[in-house]
Image (cartoon, rainbow, N blue to C red):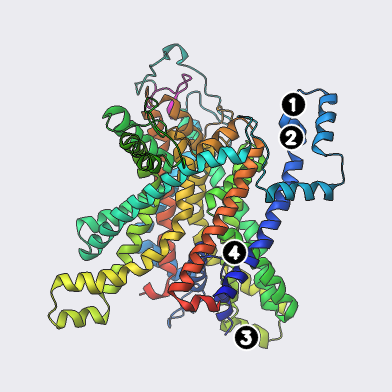
Amino acid sequence: MATEPAQRTSPPGPIGRRRAERLDRLAELAATPPDERGESLTRETLRRLRRSPMAMVGASIVLIFVVIALIGPLLTPPPSWLPLPLYSPIENVGLEQIRPGQIPGPSGDHWLGLDHLGRDELSRMLYGARQTLLVGVVATLIGFTAGAVIGGVAGAAYGLGGRIGRWIDSILMRFIDLLLAMPPLLLAFSVAAVLGRSLTAVMIAVGVAATPIFARLLRGSMIAQANRDYVLAATSLGVRRPRIVLSHVFPNSLAPVIVQATLTLATAIIEAAGLSFLGLGNPDSRWPEWGTMLAQAQAQLAVQPMLAVYPAIAIIITALGFTLLGEAMREALDPKLRR
Amino acid sequence: MTRFIIRRLLQVIPTLAALSVLLFIWLRRLPGGPDAALLGERATPEARAAIRERLGLDEPILVQYGRYMKDLLRLDFGVSTQTQQPVIDEFLIRFPGTVELAFTALAIAVGVGIPVGYLAARRRGGWLDNLVVSGSMVGICTPVFFLAFVLKWVFGEQLGWLPTFGRQSPGINATHVTNFFVLDGLLTREWDAAWDAFLHLLLPAIAVASIPFAVIVRMTRASVLEVLNEDYVRTAEAKGLTDRTIRGRHVLRNALLPVVTAIGVLAGALLSGAVLTETVFAFNGIGRFVYLAIQNADYPVLMAFIMFIALTFVTINLLVDISYSIIDPRVRVH
């Protein structure tokens, strides 16, 4: 059986092993053939997602967040009509109201009050949504792409068989499992520290921390798919192996990867906030990002604690939305829970 | 057993070698090179040339790598540009603080997490169970340092119950032997110093404990639920054993085994949490030192920290693996 060896390699040390086992389980889910009615996996999964309250709550949060990130800056005074400005033109409108030991809270003009430089906090939150979405999506894409290349090559090499194929697979997975054993925040931290202080560094760092997850998942998923009847059918029709791997196995292996991408978006947002807090984010405060805003609020904690509360609540709700949606998608894929 | 340990140790060596090469390349790629990192960016060309010669940067690259490795093996990570002290000395002062924090956090997470998880599983669907399931999800989505803010603000600044700054009150007269401040106080019988250090640990430890706590509660709950469905529990009930005996001897003991073995796995969450939390409480551990190193572009410290994280995790992995293989001989086969 081709699925057995997917579990064979296990990372050096127990820390990565638990994460690896979880990923291997997820990889298996989509490889279980659909039930007797012959409904497609996608359609059945979507049907069950619609019935799940967890998925609906998560999807609503995600939808609201994306809408705010896209159109939010249109609502800020002065409105910005540019399609995707990340740099906020928010002026220090209330600078004269800022005194040592006093930062005005919510008022009619400024619904969430002012920040420590007299800028409208609500406007900054709306721009921050954009930055946060950008960081989360780009970091996840980086992790996904790098993971897809490594995991895809390993899975394909394994599938193509032969001594060299197995050898390539085993070398790549050794390396991936090693990264998997590192705590993701500290891995991201190491990468960001090497790259220097910038938003790009944070995105790359969080992406690198997510790479081993996607690599291991995609490889496991491809190897699990290799067992399916359609592969046998294609092989007996005489389709060449590289073609089977690329146009049959690979697209079918993506379902668990999409689930993981949703979950990774949540951790990416939290990790990016952590890196910003450690001072590895963009040092220019005109680029509002929730993690950086939360970090800067630390200095104002005694004067205006609400400045820490707004971005924190926003981060928690957004991360929760992606987590709920991701977990619900995984449950919907799980054949054990299929009704 | 010995062969297992030797094989695992041999697997560690290529890892650390690869890491050392990466860090060596990074060291050479620093803005302006290591000479500029030491002198600052406005140094004169003559001063740079002098320091390049002194550091041996004009020699062949392999010679440089060899010397760098020799320094690493002697735990010589260079001098911190912030404090002008050898990095290793700075780490030896601060690491005990982080360890103290991590262990206190672990004690809180285990001591509270296991009973809460057990109670949630016993009353499945009850208010505690619902609170635990939803709370642990919110907990995992909360940035650790925000929780630290909240604790500092509520219990430190508003209620004034606990100290929120540093590892020990400045006025206290304490002798430091091991740099584990609580232990030092106990060893030297300075009870007030030990108690004071312990109070300083509490708030940061609660913040650090949050994610391990959520993990332990969920694991205990799942594990107890699984054991409650086992045949031997039903048999015990059918035999008419008291609820107390069943709970203690059958359920709890079997349910805790996977939880206890997973505690080593939490080391990552504990160390990440400590790095993020120490800064909020000005707790002078490794995390705060590294935070300051980022602010001040103190590259030798950052490099040592990365090497240090890798070493710590390789060691923890190895220790947990060895302890697993003692508990469960099947692990050795892999």
Q: In the rendered structure, the residue with mark 4 lies on which chain?
A: A
Q: Which residue is mark 1?
A: B41
Q: Position of residue B236 (x, y in %)?
A: 19, 80
Above or below, comparing residue B98 to residue A327 in the picture: above
In which image quadrant can residue B18 be found?
A: bottom right
Which mark sits nearer the N-terminus, 1 or 2? Answer: 2
Q: In the rendered structure, the residue with mark 1 lies on which chain?
A: B
Q: Amino acid at mark 4?
A: Asp
**Proximity of marks 1 and 2: CB atoms separated by less than 8 Å:** yes
Horizontal side of residue A168 vs B295, given as left or right: right
> Alpha-carbon neighbours of circle 2 within 10 Å: few (<14), some, or many (≥20)?
some
Q: Which residue is mark 4?
A: A177
Q: Position of residue A49 (x, y in %)?
A: 40, 63
The CA span between labels 1 and 4 is 39 Å
SS of the residue under disc 4: helix
Above or below, comparing residue A209 to residue A152 in the picture: above
Magenta region, residue range = A110-122
Q: Which residue is mark 3?
A: A233
> Alpha-carbon neighbours of circle 1 within 10 Å: few (<14), some, or many (≥20)?
few
The CA span between labels 1 and 2 is 9 Å
> Alpha-carbon neighbours of circle 4 within 10 Å: few (<14), some, or many (≥20)?
many
**Proximity of marks 2 and 4: CB atoms separated by less than 8 Å:** no
The CA span between labels 3 and 2 is 57 Å
Q: Which residue is mark 2?
A: B31
The CA span between labels 2 and 4 is 32 Å
The CA span between labels 4 and 3 is 33 Å
Horizontal side of residue B23 vs A63, given as left or right: right
Establish whether labels 3 and 1 are both on one chain: no
Q: Position of residue B215 (x, y in %)?
A: 38, 57
SS of the residue under disc 3: helix
